[in-house]
Image (tube, rainbow, N blue to C red):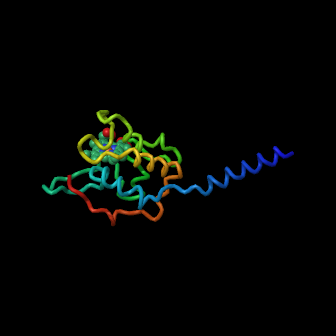
Amino acid sequence: MRIHTTLIALASFGVAASANAEGPDFEKEIWPFVKNSCVKCHQPEHKDERGRSRRPKGDLVITNKEAFLKGGEDGAVIVAGKPEESPFLDRTKLPLDHDDHMPPEGKADQWTDAQKELFAAWVKAGADFGAWTRDAEVDIQGE
Ligand code: HEC
């Protein structure tokens, strides 16, 4: 009887703990390094400083929530709850000289291990964008 009660107590503690676990805040903790390393090539079509049209690479736009969730030419890049199935994270973990590695070597700052872990924690907690939704706050950068 005593063991039984302990098990129930442990089980309900587990449920409470996971329900309370909040992931990192997207806008404050994730967006700054995503923007720094990835927006340059994954923003809406625009003209560069020489007036040439620049399309988002891989058809992936990440400057607003809707487009980010839609993903690129190969489909979704974030699978809520599943960091290991989310190409947006996975590609940053490939060897630097792998063709699919992001960002391409030498083209933008690489994510640090701490940033990869933070991104994984955010996806695991449900990939909640919070109040962050739109393009208005993004300055389009040249290439
Ligand atoms: C210098 C340009 C450049 C930067 C910076 C860059 N990418 Fe890319 N990205 C590309 C190109 C080119 C492709 C298309 C070719 C490919 O799929 O590898 C692509 C494709 C992708 C795709 C696949 C989209 C699809 O559905 O096919 C993902 C995911 C991705 N990038 C993630 C990232 C992440 C994460 C970062 C930042 C850490 C980043 N990219 C930064 C150039 C860039």
Q: Is residue 87 above or below residue 141?
A: above
Q: Is residue 59 visible?
A: no
How far across and how far down the image is residue 37, in percent? 31, 50
How far across and how far down the image is residue 53, in percent? 20, 53
In-front residue for pair 143/66 = 143
Q: Is residue 128 above or below residue 83?
A: below
Residue found farthest to the front:
2
Q: Left or right: 124 with respect to 17? A: left
Q: Which of the image's four quarters has the N terminus? A: top right
How far across and how far down the image is residue 8, in percent? 77, 49
Query: Which residue corresponds to the image point at 48% horizontal and 56% vertical from the top-left?
Result: 24
In-front residue for pair 69/104 = 104
Q: Is residue 135 visible?
A: yes
Q: Quadrant of residue 67?
A: bottom left
In-front residue for pair 121/59 = 121
Query: Which residue corresponds to the image point at 34% horizontal and 34% vertical from the top-left?
Result: 95
In-front residue for pair 65/59 = 65
Residue found farthest to the left:
50
Q: Left or right: 110 with respect to 11? A: left
- Ligand 1 is located in which of the four quadrants? top left
Residue found farthest to the right:
1
How far across and how far down the image is residue 134, in percent? 38, 63
Q: How many numbered marks have been drawn onto this rendered protein structure?
A: 0
